[in-house]
Image (cartoon, rainbow, N blue to C red):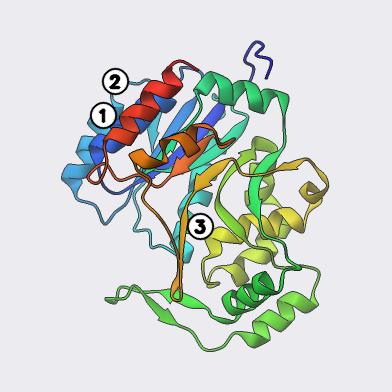
Amino acid sequence: MKMGKISMRIAYFIMVHQYAEQFALLLDAIQHPDNIYLIHVDAKSSTEFEEHIKNIGSKYSNMHFLKRQSVRRCLWSLTEVQLHAIEYLLSMTDQNWDYFINLSGQCFPLKSQNYIMNYLANNQGNYIGLLNSQDPLVQKDSIYRQRNHYKETNTSTGFDKLTDQGQLLNEFSAGKYNYYTGSGWFFLTREFCDFVVNSEVSKEIKPYMKTVFISDESYIQTILMNGEFAKKPLFPYKRFISMNVQTNGSHPVDLKEGNFIELIISDAFFARKFDITQDAAILKMLQFHIGGK
C-alpha cells in the first residue's frame, strides 16, 4: 500500500480490568502523538489497579480517563460504556479525530500506527463485523437473542432473566427496523459515531436494545443497517480472533507464540485475546514485528 502523508487521527477507547503490565505494552505499541486515548478501568477492579493504570498513562499527554462503571460481558453495560466513550470523545470540541477504535486491555496491534492511519486515510468507511442475516444459523441465534432479555442486577449472577419478550420482538420486527448482529469490535467514522448517539434511529432502538442479550454485538450493527450509513462504504472489521465454539457459547482462545506466523500474515490490524500470564513472548514478538513496519 502506498504510504502518503498521514491526515487521519484515531480516538482509541481501551477497556481494561486486569494485567497492568500487558496494558502498558499495548499502550506503547499503539501510541502516536496525533491520536487520542480514552481509558476505562472497570469499577470491579481495585483502586490500586486504577492508580497503576493511571501511572502508566501519566507519561503521555494524549491520555484521558472515562468515569468508572461496572461492566458485565453480554449485558447492556458493555454497550453503554462504549456509548459513554463516544459521547465523551465527541464532546472534546478542542480535539479533532476521524475514527473511533475500541480495544480491550487484552488486544494487541499487528500493524504499526503509521500503517493503520495511512490505510484508513485511503480507505474511508466503517469497519465492522456483520453476520449474514440470511444464514439460517444466524437467524436462529438472532431470534434467541431478541427473545431472551436480561436486566443487570447486584445479585451474584449479575442479571435477572426477564420474561419472554416476544411481544417486544414482534413490535420491533413489524416496524421499520430490522435486527442485525456481528462483532463487538469495530472502527467507526466520527460522522457515524455522531449518528450512533444523536440520531432518531438510535433513540428509537435503544429502549428495546437495553435488555437484548449480547447487545454489544448487535446495537451498532442494527443502527448502521437501519440508517443512511448502510449505503456508505463498509469494510471487514480487521480483527484476528480465534474462537472456541462450545455448546454453551463461543469464547476467544488465548493467542500464543505458536500463532505468530498466522498473525503477521493476516490482513488484520488487531488481534485478541492475549494473556501475559500464559504467554508473554508473543507480545514481545509482535512488538518487535510492528516496530519495523
SS type, badge 2? loop
Q: Earlier in the sequence, mark 1 or mark 3?
A: 1
Report the residue at 81% width, 69% height from top: 176
Where residue 77 appears, x then y in whole percent? Answer: 44, 61
Task: Write the residue at 28% across / 37% down.
Answer: 22
* Badge 2 vs badge 1, beta-carbon distance below 8 Å: yes
| Residue at the extreme right | 231
Residue 231 in sight here? yes
Label 2 or label 3, whichever comes before in sequence order: 2
Q: Is residue 214 above or below residue 21?
A: below
Q: Locate residue 23, reporting x and y percent.
A: 31, 36
Residues under labels 2 and 3: Cα distance?
29 Å
Indicate the secondary structure of the residue bearing disc 3: helix
Q: Which residue is mark 1?
A: 56
The crowd level at tag 1 (other Cα within 10 Å; few <14, some 14-19, many 20+) is some
Q: From the viewer's perspective, is residue 30 above or below residue 203?
A: above
Which label is found at residue 270? none
Name the residue: 26% across, 29% down. Answer: 56
- Residue closer to the observer: 222 or 105: 105
Q: Residue beneath label 2, please?
A: 59
**Label 2 amino acid?**
Lys
For label 3, the crowd category at 10 Å Cα-Cα, with few meaning under 14, some 14 to 19 and many 20 or more, is: many
Q: Residues within 10 Å of mark 2 (few under 14, many from 20)?
A: few
Q: Is residue 282 above or below residue 139?
A: above
**Mark 3 — residue?**
79
Residue drawn at point x = 58 percent, y = 45 percent:
186
Instruction: Measuring from the top left, give residue 16's x and y in whole percent.
Output: 34, 45
